Amino acid sequence: MVLLELTLIVFLWAGKYPPDMFFLQVIWCIGLCMIALAGLIFLPTKLLLTLGILIVAGHNVMDGLSMTEDSPFYLVWAVLYQREVIDFNFFMIRTSYPILPWVGVIALGFVAGPWFSSDTSPDKRQKKMLTVGAIGLFSFVIIRFLNIYGDAPWINTSEFSTTLMSFLSLTKYPSSFLFNLSMLSLGLVFLCLFEKYGSHKFTRVFSQFGAAPLFFYALHLAVLKLIYVIAFAIYGPSDGIYLAFPSVGYIWGAFLVLVFALYFPTRWFAGFKQANKHISWLKYF
């Protein structure tokens, strides 16, 4: 996945290779987290659970820790936590997706893996997901309301809508404690509801994206780049040197159209992958 980020994904974002700058983003981050997990899985389960919680909940205490280029730990810290542009003379990289918080997330995901095994009944799994998710969301509201830890402070603007926007404005790069607490908790609640109340057809449709997520990710980048190049050739720039949507509504519209259109090739690839398990490289997509 790290290699894929440095080659195909970078090309799909930039539209050329080599790019002006290598942006190290989510695929790179997941790959490094998997490498870290390859060692972490040998820890006792309770220790791994504790470590995952400590990383996810505690890393924001290091927000003020910054390292300069003369530090021997500069490159390591840039990958782990500090977003940086690093010039290697022949090429430049941007550590867009610091990995440390996500190492904690992948550790927690591994510990939760037995919830989804055939040995766990659906009722027991749903109860665990709903309980942990509800506790997480309740904790998020309380901690966020206190406004003392876990993310940048929110601001009371004396207007409900903008105050709510500030309250829900969470940091993703690197992902804050409150960002991950809210997203993981919501994810558990939705998983519970989808399994318990979702129709067979509904879950089957959405599971196609989960069966080939990396394929969908790469495909949507390629399609977006192609559409952009064609639209730019027709309309030219609208925002400086770029062609941009005029409002957020167009972004949501494009999202819905792309999800519908790309569902079909994603479903095909998911089926192809399942039918050809002997082709080892397919599992990475």
Image (cartoon, helix red, strand yellow):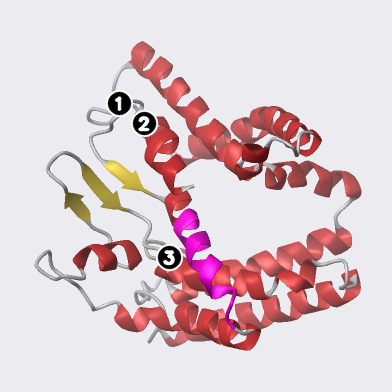
- Amino acid type, residue under disc 1 in the picture: Ser
Q: How many marks?
A: 3
Q: Which amino acid lies under the numbered mark 3 shown in the image of this protein?
A: Ser
Main SS, magenta residues: helix
Q: Which residue is mark 2?
A: 244
Residue 38 x %, y %? 54, 66
For marks 1 and 2 on the same chain, the one whose residue lies earlier in the sequence: 1
Q: Which residues are magenta?
A: 30-43
Q: Quadrant of residue 132?
A: bottom right
Q: Nearer the viewer, residue 140 or 107?
A: 107
The image's mark for residue 169 is 3
Position of residue 33 measured from the top left corner of the image (x, y, whole percent): 48, 62
Of the numbered discs 3 and 1, the one sitting upstream in the chain is: 3
Badge 1 element? loop
The x, y position of residue 127, in whole percent, is 82, 78
Q: Secondary structure at mark 2?
A: loop
Q: Are marks 1 and 2 in contact (CB under 8 Å)?
A: yes
